[in-house]
Amino acid sequence: LALMFQSFYIVAFTYVLWFWLLTRYPAAGLSSFAFLSPVFGVLCGAVLLGEPLTIRIFLALGLIAAGLIIVNRPSRKQVPA
């Protein structure tokens, strides 16, 4: 069952989705979203395996979200002096 999940979902769906996204958006913008894989891993572990979600985990997930917001915010145009 795990091999089928890896074969169909991971390979057939997510890789195709990733390369489709690369045709639509710049790679530099998408690369930061690779840091979301631990977030989905933690959330799937809680939902599917019943693992506990503690305040420390939520703080860590918040730090990941803050980092993504900082990295992906639009750059400010500098006014010439």
Image (cartoon, rainbow, N blue to C red):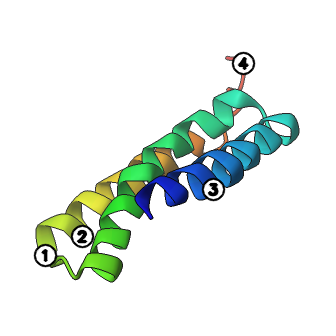
In percent of width and height, residue 75 lies at 65, 35
Lower sequence index among marks 1 and 3? 3
Query: Dot 1: what SS?
Result: loop
Q: Residue at x 44, y 51 (%)?
A: 37
Q: Residue at x 51, y 41 (%)?
A: 34
Q: Residue at x 67, y 42 (%)?
A: 15
In percent of width and height, residue 74 lies at 67, 42
Front-lying residue, 48 or 43: 48
According to the picture, the residue beneath numbered tag 3 turns out to be 8
Q: Nearer the viewer, mark 4 or mark 3?
A: 3
Q: Residue at x 86, y 41 (%)?
A: 24
The reply to whether dot 2 and dot 1 touch (C-beta < 8 Å) is yes
According to the picture, the residue beneath numbered tag 2 turns out to be 58
The quadrant of the rendering that contains the C terminus is top right
Q: Which mark is residue 77?
A: none
Q: At label 1, which amino acid type do we have?
A: Thr
According to the picture, the residue beneath numbered tag 1 turns out to be 54
Assess disc 4: are there few (<14), some (14-19) or many (≥20) residues with their C-alpha within 10 Å of its C-alpha.
Answer: few
Q: At label 3, which amino acid type do we have?
A: Phe
Lower sequence index among marks 1 and 4? 1
Asked whether the viewer can see residue 75, the reply is no
Lower sequence index among marks 2 and 3? 3
Q: At label 4, which amino acid type do we have?
A: Pro
The reply to whether dot 1 and dot 4 touch (C-beta < 8 Å) is no
